[in-house]
Image: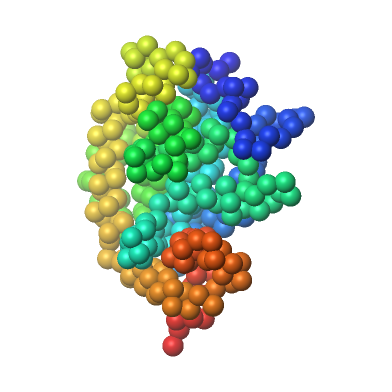
Amino acid sequence: MLAGYAVQVELSRGRRFPEPPHPYRNDYQRDRDRVIHARAFRRLVDKTQVFTRRYSDHFRNRLTHTIEVSQITRTVAAALALNVDLAEALALVHDLGHPPFGHAGEKALDSAMREHNLFFDHNLHALRIVEDFEQRYAAFRGLNLTFEVREGIIKHSRDYDPAKHPELAEYLLDHRPPLEAQLVDLTDEIGYSTADVDDGYEAHLLTLDQIREGVPVFERFFREVAQIYPDAPGKLQFNEALKRVFNRMAGDLITHTQARLKHAGIETLADVRLYKERLVAFSPEVEAERKQIKDFLYENLYYSPSLAGEKDDAERIVTELFAFWMNNPSALPHYYQEKAEQESLPRVVCDYIAGMTDHFIIEQYEKHCGD
Ligand code: MG
């Protein structure tokens, strides 16, 4: 049973190109499956989340991060009686527009575009992927996803100014996105903040003492765990404590959002869309803890000297390759040369680079910029 404020698939605004219904799957289940079968989705396996393969094959990459986020999202969506199929599709698609080399790659690509008075935004890029770049069907370009999935792709993590983005007018920019989309922004936070503590510890870039000192919520649970399992190996005590942090965040997201919906008198999807702010939220207490974890990770992991070298490499590779193709457009693959006849060259080069895996962009760099 869906809550009154959930998105109902029967009331979807539909696809750009109408298609007959599927005998076994509803439209959001189909959209979820179209994302899973997309080329851009498979490429997530070789895109850096935080750690490159140099560290270990069992750290998160963008694909396994995405699967973890979809797991959390399904649980939270079901507990809130939201549309789990839509929420799952949005979780699976949420990082589709990310360029190679994680945040460093994104920053470098954006800087290269700003030299041409343009910019790079991974949500808008994800929309271009599903609307245009994926070519699987004879009847239309792109994946022909439903309105609600396309809307969630751009609106889940930020608001776009309608005055600055007239091309997005169809996505109701002055309305809040449905709860299924709002959710993904915070399940993403739960996913990566706990996973990055985990991988950072495994990589020996974060020590147990450092985490206990810098993340008070972890320390509270760690003391509890050490009492229950005094003889367990340190790594398992660590796991048990981190699991409790994870469960606390997910549980709080459910109960606090429920309380907010009740307090605001939200009953329908229209109420959600027209409400003055987003309704999915952590309680102030857990929000403060979330911020502590994030600040801790910035200070001790994301900006750590151990990862600095790889970030510099990433920036150099993206920046130099961008300049190379700007100066040598005839070295672009034929498909992109044709695109450059309709669109500006920087945009086409940016699209090409953004779609690459870490492995492929390094190969291109060695081919075109190596000495
Ligand atoms: Mg993410």
Q: Tell which of 288 and 123 is nearer to you.
A: 123
**Figure check: 324 above or below 116:** below
Q: Quadrant of the N terminus?
A: top right
Q: Residue 19 vs residue 334: left or right?
A: right
Q: Quadrant of the C terminus?
A: bottom left
Residue at the image point whose x is 30% and y is 56% from the top: 301
Q: Residue furthest front?
A: 342
Q: Position of residue 138 (x, y in %)?
A: 74, 49
Q: How is the image coloured?
A: rainbow
Q: Residue 331 vs residue 49: left or right?
A: right
Q: Residue furthest right?
A: 23
Q: Position of residue 161 (x, y in %)?
A: 34, 39
Q: Tell which of 329 and 292 is nearer to you.
A: 329
Instruction: Say which quarter of the image contains residue 44.
Output: bottom right
Q: Tell which of 74 and 89 is nearer to you.
A: 89
Residue at the image point whose x is 54% and y is 77% from the top: 330
Using the rendered image of the protein, determine whether residue 200 is visible from the camera's viewpoint: yes
Residue at the image point whose x is 36% and y is 24% from the top: 279
Q: Position of residue 19 (x, y in %)?
A: 71, 35
**Figure check: 173 above or below 338:** above
Q: Residue 151 vs residue 262: left or right?
A: right
Q: Residue furthest bottom?
A: 371
Using the rendered image of the protein, determine whether residue 310 is visible from the camera's viewpoint: no
